[in-house]
Amino acid sequence: MRYGVCLGLKKPERIHSAAAAGFDYIECGFRDVAEISEEGMSQLMRQLDAEGIGCEAANGFIPSSMPIYRPYSETGIDRYMRAGFRACRAIGIKTVVFGSGGARNVPDGMSFSDCFRKLIDFIRYTAAPAADAAGVTLAVEPLTRGECNIINTLREGAELAAASGCGNTGVTADIYHMHNCGDGPDEIRLLGAAVKHGHISFPLEREGRNRTFPAEAGEYGYREFLAALRDSGVTRCSVEAGTSDFASDCAAAAKMLRSIVL
């Protein structure tokens, strides 16, 4: 398993911390790369090369300002995605996580079935082909019901991916959302190859936060989660969590993850 950590590109010092901690890669925001300048791209590539770490995944696919159910010509989604996937190809990003609760939330006045069909069409005709042209896998992320009112469980995410009929589309297993939506490692194994990516954190409340960096191997069922990902063929899992001390928590999480023998 390759381990990564999610971070924003506006804090380049965190890339150094991730590399120093021993993570294999970083996972950035898709919007960061979609809107990056030419000079910003050059600086990012130089830093990644100097630190000896890659950027292999991205999340935060579609911002809430671009709701998927409105005409794309109004929101600019097409242009935004083209720019983002061009950057993904240049940087070497292999997986884009499609969470985007604000953009895919079923709005008042629209039915669930209409929105589900529009999500299928968005993936089938717009997102997945653009991702495929860049050599990227699109991984739908089920979200907690408090964040999004559509696609909340792994099975629902896998059903959406399958309905799109796109071979480069699957699902992200995020331990935080799984915990809050009642999914467990057995569900990952049941879905098998449909699971393409993983997110890990301590999914319970700690120090006033709902999801924090994993710290100790025995504090939650990390081993079972990671073993299920491995058994389903997943090769990357990123820490996605809040922190008040990124460098310290990053180092502790990387050490803990390496201590888990699968």
Image (cartoon, rainbow, N blue to C red):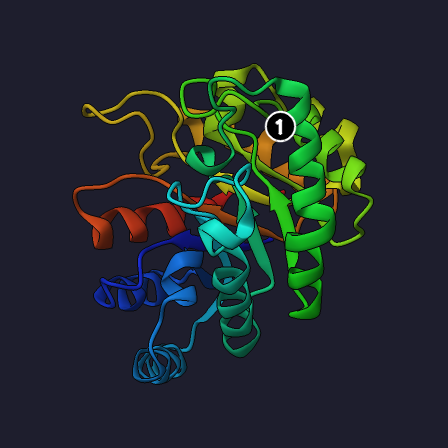
Percent position of residue 185, x then y: 64, 26
Question: Is 61 in front, or is 103?
Answer: 103
Task: Indicate the quadrant where residue 214 lies.
Answer: top left
Which residue is painted at 47% across and 25% down in the image?
148
- The kind of residue on which mark 1 rests is Cys
Q: Residue furthest top?
A: 182
**Total numbered labels placed on residues in the image:** 1
Where 167 falls versus 132 (above or below)? Answer: above
Where 201 falls versus 245 (above or below)? Answer: above
Question: Considering the numbered disc 1 on the image, is that residue within a helix, a strand or a loop?
Answer: helix
> Could you tell me if residue 228 is visible in this image?
no
Percent position of residue 144, x then y: 47, 22
Which residue is painted at 26% across and 46% down in the image?
249
Q: Is residue 122 left or right of residue 66?
A: right
Question: Is 39 in front, or is 72?
Answer: 72
Q: Is residue 189 left or right of residue 111?
A: right
Percent position of residue 134, x then y: 64, 70
> Could you tell me if residue 17 is visible in this image?
yes
Question: Is 24 in front, or is 49?
Answer: 49
Which residue is painted at 74% across and 54% down in the image?
168
Question: Is 154 in front, or is 62?
Answer: 62
Q: Which residue is mark 1?
A: 115
What crowding class fits label 1: few (fewer than 14 Cα within 10 Å), some (14-19), or many (20 or more)? some
The quarter of the image holding the C terminus is top right
Where 179 falls versus 47 (above or below)? Answer: above
Percent position of residue 204, x then y: 36, 21
Task: Indicate the quadrant where residue 225 lies.
Answer: top right
